Image (cartoon, coloured by chain):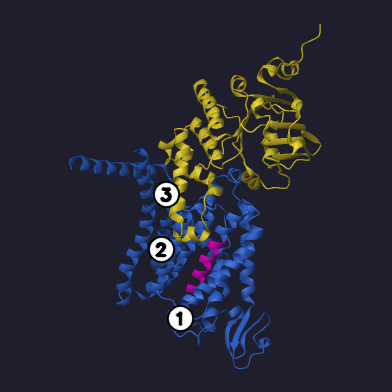
Chain colours: A yellow, B blue
Amino acid sequence: MAKMIPVPSNSIIPERDLDKKPILETCHLGIDFGGLTAVDDFTLTVGRTEIAGLIGPNGAGKTTVFNLLTNVYQPTRGTIMLDGVSTAKKTVAQVSRMGIARTFQNIRLFSNMSVIDNVKVGLHNSIDQSLFSAITHCFGYRKSEKKSREEALELLDFFSMADWADFQAGSLPYGAQRRLEIVRALATHPGIILLDEPAAGMNPSETAELMDNIRKIRDTFHIAVMLIEHDMNLVMNICEGICVLDHGKVIAKGTPDEIKTNPKVIEAYLGKKKEA
Amino acid sequence: MSKIGNKIKNLNKFTLTNIKAYSIVIIAFIILFPLNSRGMISNSMSGLLVPICTYIVMAISLNLTVGFLGELSLGHAGFMSVGAFVGVIAASCFQDIIVSDVLRLIVSIIFGGFFAGIAGFIIGIPVLRLRGDYLAIVTLAFGEIIKNIINCLYVGIDAAGLHMGMTSIEALGMTNGRIIINGPQGAVGITKLSSFTAGVILILFTLFVVLNLVNSKTGRAVTAIRDNAIAAESVGIGITRYKLTAFIVSAVLAGMAGALYAMNFSSIVAKKFDFNTSILILVFVVLGGMGNIVGSIIATAVLYILPELLREFSDYRMLIYAIVLILVMLITNSEKTKQIKEQILLKLSRNKNKQRQEE
């Protein structure tokens, strides 16, 4: 499949991933809400084990892009290929099963459930348990519950949250709730995880921990990470490729160093210099 | 070590609620059964035993929809009604084939549950696309539709088999058969098959199904949908499928309760299962606590007996009943009672710790 190899000028893939099939490809993606074009001509390729950043001023359409990628909104134009398969006309749940996981800008946990149950819900589609065995608690129920509990604890342990397993999710401190959301997303065994402002409301030490965690996720699970973030320190430090969005359009793509010096980006963030 | 500790703690928490629920029912049975069989309970009270059992089943099953799925259903009595009348028809049909009363009761309860499940499926498909208030209103409408359909249903049986019609009993064209359901007069000539024991067994069965379901993959998906539907969808849970599952299970259990209920009387009319009955069950669930199975059992038992106990107040009966409802609501929700409860629990756990240390 020769056409799968992305055009270099269009991609922000790190070099080590260039020979592999990208995990996520979007082509001329766009959506209109009534007369308003929220996102237009969004073309991006994300490599298998890449950490990509999506930045832009408020209202640029970053979260809309995430909602398009997870099929919460059906795109008006363009295509999304996830691991080489189009996600058109799939439901949100189906797209999740195809290997895309996400967290939310405003935390959306199952706050009345325990921490471990939140992760088990994430594991939902990998638990082999029929309705009959669920009602009778026999015929493989114990085995599947034990397996899911072990797997959930392992994931929680990875983020040093195993001690909180039986706490109510809504009672956790803010930072831990954000972390739990990431754990839950990882439990779906995704190929790419989308993080919507993971560092929002965090103090510098929590942000540093988050940066370590994001790298750890990539290195341990060998998946791609795409994140929306306003914390430029975080973005410039961990992202290998950055895409800048303004008014629904991509205004720049490249490595952190390229983005930092890009005049268009500076203009979008700080405004145009007055001509003398 | 901490992992193993967590495991034990979690197991205990899960089994504790189960043990509590089962033991309350079994203890009540052990106490009430001999009293009842020796005639030590007044007639009016012993007549309430089977209805209480059915309403407990109704409350537990409605709790699955309202407490765990988080959707307000106001048509639960509709499923009870389907179960009741299908159960009566089944019992009538099998009168000659199945001689054993117990077996006939079981078969008609299964039939009642099955058809109520089908009704739940048919109603659930359009209804579960709606949310909140709209869902409540549409379930209310469906409950009324079921009531009105059964209200003009004529069913009879003769040598040729089962006859059904919607116009009149003559239109069925039966030759010296037996009438089972006679339109607005409802089901007549029911053989009384239900017993207190059967009621308790049905409660235990319901507890088994609901408690097991809640502590499973399906139950977690259902609770997740209640807590945050968008997030549940984002981790790959098909919302409609699990909503429908919970709704149907709840309908099946309600149908079974309905069959048991109908078999306790010699005749039963469709009007019995109207909006008021649905609301009554909802009151039991709300006062017992949403998602609290043990609470549902206790609330149903207490609130169902209460009007009977208040009989001596005659005219003021319903007024006092309403006041009690309001008081229960206020007391269970006030911050002070919560604080007192916590203090008591704290003292208890301290005592336990002391005992342990002394040991």
Is residue A247 within the magenta segment?
no
Q: Chain of mark 2?
A: B
Q: Which residue is mark 2?
A: B301
Closer to us: B207 or B175: B207
Q: Residue type at mark 3: give it.
A: Thr
Q: Residue furthest left?
A: B358
| Helix, strand or loop under label 1 | loop
Give the Cα separation between the discs numbered 3 and 2.
17 Å
Ranked by sequence position, the earlier of labels 3 and 2 is 2
Residue B332, labelled with which disc?
A: 3
> Quick check: marks 3 and 1 in contact, CB under 8 Å?
no
Ranked by sequence position, the earlier of labels 1 and 2 is 1
Give the Cα separation between the discs numbered 3 and 1.
39 Å
**Badge 3: residue crowd in 10 Å (few <14, some 14–19, many ≥20):** some
Q: Which residue is mark 1?
A: B192
Q: Position of residue B215 (x, y in %)?
A: 46, 53
Closer to us: A103 or A87: A87
Give the Cα separation between the discs numbered 1 and 2.
22 Å
Q: Nearer the viewer, mark 3 or mark 1?
A: 1
Report whether A118 appears left or right of A44. left
Residue B196 vertical position relative to residue B164 in the rendered view, above or below: above
Ranked by sequence position, the earlier of labels 3 and 1 is 1
